[in-house]
Image: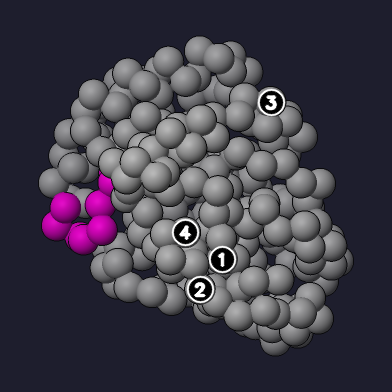
Amino acid sequence: MWIAETFQSVQGEGRHVGVPSLFIRTSGCNLRCWFCDTPYTSWEPEGEQRTLESLLDEVRSAECQHVVITGGEPMLVPDLAPLTQQIAELGRTITIETAGTVDLPVTAHLMSISPKLANSVPDDPAWSERHNRGRHQPEVIRRLTTDYDYQLKFVIDAPDDIADVDEYLVEFPHITADRVYLMAQAREPEELRVKSEWLDPLAEEKGWRVSPRLHIELFGNTRGT
């Protein structure tokens, strides 16, 4: 498996915010969001080849019971299915962070899906059309939100993005408001604070939740945190 990094920290977003976690970050992505905060897994992917057994050894030795598999797009990695199965057999709780565009028969206790809205499309002409064409795969979303416990995390850059979330959710009437999180697009604590001032009331009005970005608040946009 092509792995960008592994590290222990706290989960910064969503339902398990603040939970000590071992992060396994795969490298490689089928999308190119302009605001990607891990370009070393997408725009300029890097990493090293790791065996399944070396990753399992790291899980065994970690102090954390919660394992977060993220990327890049981890669902691109065929070996993710046996890896997650064996991590679960070790008694660990698994969250998979995905854009919801690729499907694999993985084991996960929480499928953390971050659908990409129109606000994610890059200006780069080499990628804009491809990204826009691939960012929404409704059959994958239906499967992941039917077969797993799940949360949806939408990155919000401007107040107008709320209308896109509304339109998106119309397509999936089974998704309830309590599963929907909004996250401010921010890479620095001050930017996060400013956007939260208008994001919080907009989410409350819809009955949605606002996800903190605890890792940004604590560490800024720092790799390995």
As drawn, which residue projects farthest toward the front? 126
Which residue is under mark 4?
Answer: 42
Q: Could you tell me how far apart the alpha carbons at marks 1 and 2 are, in whole angstroms?
A: 6 Å
Out of 188 and 200, give the one closest to the viewer.
188
Q: Secondary structure at mark 3?
A: helix
119 shown above or below 66? above
Q: Earlier in the sequence, mark 1 or mark 3?
A: 1
Which residue is under mark 3?
Answer: 139
Which residue is under mark 1?
Answer: 27
Which residue is under mark 2?
Answer: 46
Circle 2/circle 4 CB separation < 8 Å = no
Residue at (13, 46) in percent of width and height: 194
Q: Earlier in the sequence, mark 2 or mark 3?
A: 2
- The amino acid type, in three-letter code, at marker 1 is Ser
The answer to whether residue 202 of the structure is visible from this angle is yes
> Which portion, as a residue range, is magenta?
184-191
- Mark whose residue sits in front, 1 or 3: 1
Quadrant occupied by the C terminus? bottom left
Q: Secondary structure at mark 2?
A: loop
- The amino acid type, in three-letter code, at marker 3 is Glu
| Callout 1 crowding tier (Cα within 10 Å): few <14, some 14–19, many ≥20 | many
| Callout 3 crowding tier (Cα within 10 Å): few <14, some 14–19, many ≥20 | few
Does the magenta run of residues contain 30? no
Q: Secondary structure at mark 1?
A: loop
